């Protein structure tokens, strides 16, 4: 499972560093897409920053679950945006979201620690 997680995290990092970097760099297609969405260019910067931060969190010990959840949440928003505003197929966002969900599942043991819930009661 370790190699599978590693492969997924590499794939997700490449995808989200590319997409987040394009958003922050102001690639014309990204600017036009966020104009069409209607939330302004500040939302493009925010989304790009979340994608880069999420990709970085995939590599921090005991923080992979946070990165996967942030990126997965971003993909839920992307799917909904495609369905209700943009129109083109949302398949890439769905696939990336499912990959994020898989990483989240693989690292699910981190969730109690991240939420600050540790079992201190005697068994």
Image (cartoon, helix red, strand yellow):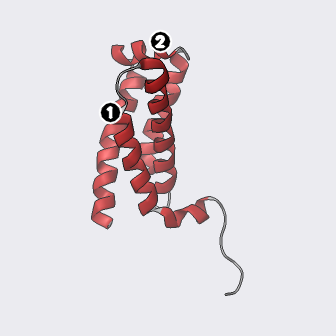
* Residue toward you, 107 or 14: 107
User: Quick one: quadrant of the N terminus?
Assistant: bottom left
Circle 1: element type: helix
Residue 92: x and y, percent?
33, 35
User: Quick one: quadrant of the C terminus?
Assistant: bottom right
Q: Quadrant of residue 32?
A: top left
* Residue 90 horizontal side relative to residue 44, left or right: left
Residue 1 circle label: none
Residue 46: x and y, percent?
53, 28
* Residue 66 horizontal side relative to residue 123, left or right: left
Q: Is residue 64 above or below residue 28?
A: below
For marks 2 and 1, give the CA distance. 20 Å
Q: Is residue 15 above or below residue 115?
A: above
Instruction: Say few, some or many: other residues with alpha carbon within 10 Å of mark 1 (under 14 / 14 to 19 / 20 or more).
Output: some
N-terminal of the two: label 2 or label 1?
Answer: 1
Q: Is residue 118 above or below residue 49?
A: below
Residue 39: x and y, percent?
56, 17
Residue 4: x and y, percent?
29, 61
> Which residue is under mark 1?
18
* Residue toward you, 108 or 87: 87
Circle 2: element type: helix
Q: Is residue 123 above or below residue 83?
A: below
* Residue 29 horizontal side relative to residue 107, left or right: left
Instruction: Answer whether labels 2 and 1 touch (C-beta < 8 Å).
Output: no
Foreground mark, 2 or 1?
2
Which residue is depicted at the point 52% across and 51% down? 66
> Which residue is under mark 2?
35
């Amino acid at each position: 499972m370790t190699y599978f997680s590693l492969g997924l995290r590499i794939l997700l990092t490449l995808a989200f560093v590319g997409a987040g970097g394009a958003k922050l760099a102001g690639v014309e297609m990204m600017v036009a897409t966020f104009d069409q969405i209607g939330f302004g260019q500040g939302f493009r910067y925010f989304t790009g920053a979340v994608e880069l931060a999420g990709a970085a969190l995939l590599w921090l010990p005991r923080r992979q679950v946070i990165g996967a959840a942030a990126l997965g949440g971003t993909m839920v928003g992307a799917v909904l945006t495609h369905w209700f505003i943009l129109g083109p197929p949302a398949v890439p966002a769905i696939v990336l979201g499912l990959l994020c969900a898989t990483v989240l599942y693989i690292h699910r043991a981190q969730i109690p620690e991240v939420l600050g819930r540790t079992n201190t009661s005697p068994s």
